[in-house]
Amino acid sequence: MAKSVADVVEDLRDLLNKSAKDVITLTWPQFYKEAGRERMKDAFMTELVKQAKDASIFVAFGNAVVLVAKDYKFSPI
């Protein structure tokens, strides 16, 4: 069953915290599995980015991976 946007954001935050890293990358198949979906509409992805931002998580969609990162200064220059 497809998860709600809020559930996906919570799961991504848990993955990030459990990894003990500031940034993680998921392949698209991993991301689809994590989201509990077989297809995603643009509206779902837009809402996911919005709710992730509210949770201080940065989500970016690339061609090969989905980037999930903490949305605060974690690696100062």
Image (cartoon, grey):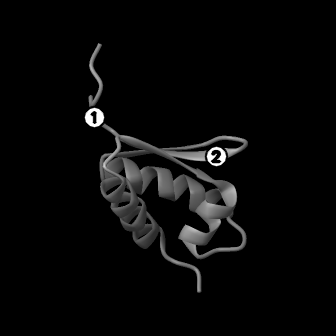
Q: Secondary structure at mark 1?
A: loop
Q: Amino acid at mark 2?
A: Val
The residue identified by callout 1 is 72
Give residue 51's position: percent from left, percent from top: 40, 56
Please state the horizontal and vertical placement of residue 36, each as a whole percent of the image: 58, 76
Q: Residue at x 46, y 67 (%)?
A: 8
Q: Which residue is mark 2?
A: 65
- Taking 9 as reference, is 66 above or below it? above
Q: Foreground: 51 or 59?
A: 59
Specify the label residue 30 is tagged with: none
Location of the N terminus (image quadrant) = bottom right
Mark 2 falls on what kind of element?
A: strand
Viewport quadrant of the C terminus: top left
Q: CA distance from mark 2 to mark 1?
A: 21 Å
Q: Is residue 30 left or right of residue 4?
A: right
Q: Position of residue 64 (x, y in %)?
A: 71, 44
Q: Three-letter amino acid code at disc 1? A: Tyr
**Above or below — where is 64 with respect to 6?**
above
In-image side of 16 versus 65 (left or right): left
Q: Nearer the viewer, residue 10 or 74?
A: 74
Mark 1: few/some/many CA within 10 Å (<14, 14-19, 20+): few
| Furthest-bottom residue in this view | 1
22 in relation to 44, above or below: above
**Percent of width and height locating residue 76:** 27, 19
Q: Residue furthest top?
A: 77
| Label 2 or label 1, whichever comes before in sequence order | 2
